[in-house]
Image (tube, grey):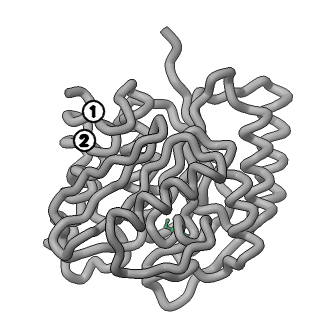
């Protein structure tokens, strides 16, 4: 049996419980060696703080990939999250081309927007490049805002099941094989995911917690990736990830001053149990 080595490609936000500081602990407790290809180094994430520093690591990404290539270092899966600019996207494409084992799983969270708004620093050209990238993924995990941007659909806060199914089919037309659309709410009380696989759409809802924060999508994507690589199917992986996110948001509610990220650390023990069920 081979010990799986996963690669996560996203920024390091030094404070803020998102991206690499979420993916690393979660994928580790899922039982995988996790390599990182950091794209940018930020003092903290770009939403929910007054200011941030940003160091672009695209050149360093190239150096790292070249060294991995010359030493034949390869990964069984790649999971990418927040990518800071087009040069970094090109490096993500390069690492996917050069450093993945045959049959490696490609999971892409096009983390670039939320609540109807692009995160600071992104523009239409960036969206076009992300569109090209997601067509090469096995799984994509957009939220509703990102799905609208990627499909050229006007964002709306209120929508129905047909609207969500239309988004999924438009994403599938771009070339996405398996889609987990997050943050779907058809009423005020429940929230969940819409799943597109094998040409069919399905939904999984759970209770809506009156709290959200940047980084919640990264917790979902990391748990989903861990579960999928443990051999669970798309539906079970999405359910485990949704359940964990709900528990994290409830935990976060206990700390009213903790506004910038999801409190997930005290729940990692529970995650190990869920993974092994
Ligand atoms: O996926 C959330 C995230 C990750 N990384 C950075 C961010 C955000 C959300 O604001 O700013 C740098």
SS for dot 2: helix
Dot 1 lies on which element?
helix
The residue located at (60%, 56%) in the rendering is: 10
The residue carrying pointer 1 sits among few (fewer than 14), some (14 to 19) or many (20 or more) residues within 10 Å by Cα, namely: some
- 230 displayed left or right of 132: left
Residue toward you, 111 or 55: 111
Identify the residue at horizontal 61%, vertical 66% (top origin). Answer: 150
For residue 275, the mark is 1
Give coordinates of residue 41: x percent, y percent.
64, 66
Residue 51, percent across and down?
A: 55, 88
Left or right of 238 on screen, residue 64: right
Q: Total label count?
A: 2
Tags 1 and 2 touching, CB below 8 Å: yes
Q: CA distance from mark 1 to mark 2?
A: 6 Å
Q: Residue furthest bottom?
A: 50
Is residue 58 among the parts visible in the rendering?
Answer: yes
Query: In the picture provided, is 131 more to the left or to the right than 148?
Result: right
Q: In percent of the image, x 22 and y 69: which residue is there?
A: 252
Q: Which mark is residue 60?
A: none
Q: Position of residue 120 (x, y in %)?
A: 61, 82
Q: Quadrant of residue 154?
A: bottom right
Q: Which residue is mark 2?
A: 271
In the rendered structure, the answer to whether residue 95 lies left or right of residue 215 reads: right
Residue 79 visible from this viewpoint: no
Image quadrant occupied by the C terminus: top left
Residue 195's spot in the image, x, y percent? Answer: 39, 48
The extreme front residue here reads 162
Q: Residues within 10 Å of mark 2 (few under 14, many from 20)?
A: many
Q: Is residue 98 above or below residue 3?
A: below
Up-down: is 241 above or below 45? above
Above-or-below relation of 127 to 39: below
């Amino acid at each position: 049996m081979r010990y799986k080595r996963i690669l996560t490609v996203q920024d390091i936000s030094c404070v803020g419980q998102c991206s690499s500081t979420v993916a690393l602990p979660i994928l580790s407790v899922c039982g995988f060696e996790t390599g990182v290809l950091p794209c940018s180094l930020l003092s903290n994430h770009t939403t929910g703080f007054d200011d941030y520093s940003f160091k672009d690591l695209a050149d360093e990404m190239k150096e790292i990939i070249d060294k991995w290539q010359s030493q034949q270092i390869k990964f069984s899966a790649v999971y990418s999250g927040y990518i800071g600019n087009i040069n970094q996207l090109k490096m993500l494409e390069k690492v996917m081309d050069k450093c993945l084992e045959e049959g490696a799983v490609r999971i892409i969270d096009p983390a670039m927007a939320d609540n109807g708004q692009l995160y600071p620093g992104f523009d239409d050209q960036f969206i076009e490049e992300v569109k090209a990238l997601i067509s090469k993924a096995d799984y994509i995990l957009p939220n509703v805002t990102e799905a609208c941007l990627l499909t050229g659909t006007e964002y709306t806060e209120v929508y129905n099941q047909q609207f969500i199914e239309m988004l999924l089919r438009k994403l599938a037309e771009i070339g996405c094989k398996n889609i987990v659309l997050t943050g779907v709410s058809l009423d005020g009380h429940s929230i969940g995911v819409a799943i597109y696989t094998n040409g069919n759409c399905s939904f999984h809802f759970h209770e809506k917690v009156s709290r959200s924060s940047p980084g919640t999508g990264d917790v979902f994507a990391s748990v989903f990736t861990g579960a999928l690589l443990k051999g669970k199917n798309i539906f079970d992986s999405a359910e485990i990830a949704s359940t964990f996110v709900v528990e994290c948001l409830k935990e976060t509610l206990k700390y009213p001053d903790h506004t910038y990220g999801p409190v997930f650390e005290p729940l990692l023990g529970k995650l190990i149990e869920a993974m092994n069920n």
